[in-house]
Image: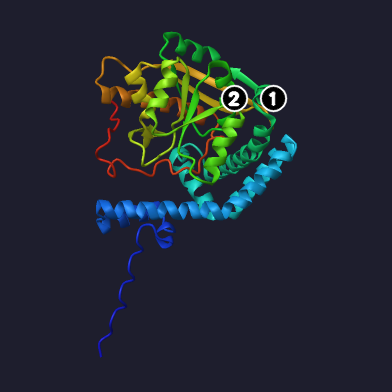
Amino acid sequence: MTETSPSPQPSPKPGTPEFQALSRDERRVLRRQLHLSAEELIAHKQAAHDLRHARHARRDPWLRLGLLVCSWLPLWLAALLGELVGLVGYFGYRRMRERGLANLELALGDELDESARKAILRRCLRLSGRGACQLPKLARLGPERVRARQEIEGAECLAKALEGGKGAIIVSMHYSLYEVSGSWFTHAFGGASVGRDAGGSGPTKWLIGARAALGNRTIERGNPREILRYLKRNEPVAFVADADVRRVKGVFVPFFGTLAHTPAGPAALSFRTGAPIVILWVEWNGLTRHRVKLSGPMTARSDLPRDKAVLDLTRRYTSVFEEVIRADPAPWLWLHKRWMTRPEDRPDLPVWTGE
């Protein structure tokens, strides 16, 4: 009597809850195995989009309640509550903790031991929670009172970049609380931040609303005409340019010694328009205050062809990000899947080779 092996379970299809529960790597491999047609891909992406919005709709009441509570708390108490939430996240969410520690090991494993990396991640989550719980209160306080709690270092960098009359491109990163910087630069120089479509609900929609309450306008990603209008008025346009976003065309440049898929939009826009790039980041200056720092300006090299000039400029401002993070790693958001996309996944994109 022969034994029959159990028949293999069918693979979950993209757009289904089972597919969304897989890791990003598993989803990418499965898509390749399925060899989906263009029509099927569109249908599956729409299904995934609908699932995401349904998930936001379920969480929306809890999000609103949390935001309401934080907006009425004293700022110092919102900060302490956020740090407590961050510690709960560290000890309570194993998958999130493992991702952060894996990123820290990849970036700083040769320089720091495991206990030091764990301490950095705990502080990272405390600071992230602090910022998340303070932001509703800051939005309620309004731009003038937020600016009164800021120190600015390097404002002359942005002023110098705007002297050419072509606008300026601010590049920033997920470091401390970027949103408060818009209160300052839009008041002093005008301009706006570029962000993704808010959709119908969810945290992104609220975040765009919080930016507006702080006096900073948002241009939806994929709206180049609006971006060019600001630059033609000699105003700055800001990008957060330190994440691996697969649907955004990027380049591969070194980040902590490993090639990282990095958005090329700011450098390409600088090359096209002549607008200089200024690097901006925000630091905590105590429990409830912030320090906005700027560096630059820098421009694309005119002696290189377009693709190489964009690649070189992206590498240069990414190296500044790395210097800032090395000086104090904890305020950077180590939970991002920063090194997810590999050059072999996107052979069509430029790769920095050191030349």
For this view, does 227 lie left or right of residue 204? Answer: left
Marking on residue 295: none
- In-image side of 4 versus 178 (left or right): left
Say which residue appears at 36% left-offset and 37% top-offset: 248
Callout count: 2
Residue 299 in percent (x, y) is at 37, 16
User: Which residue occupies 36% across, 23% down?
Assistant: 269
* Residue at the (24%, 56%) spot, across then down: 35
Up-down relation of residue 90 to residue 218 (above or below): below
Question: Residue 208 in the image: x percent, y percent?
Answer: 54, 36
Which residue is disc 1 drawn over? 145
State which quarter of the image contains the N terminus. bottom left
Secondary element type, mark 2: helix
Report the residue marked by disc 2. Answer: 183
Give x and y (percent) for residue 234.
45, 14
Q: Is residue 117 left or right of residue 138?
A: left
Residue at the far top in the pictured view: 163
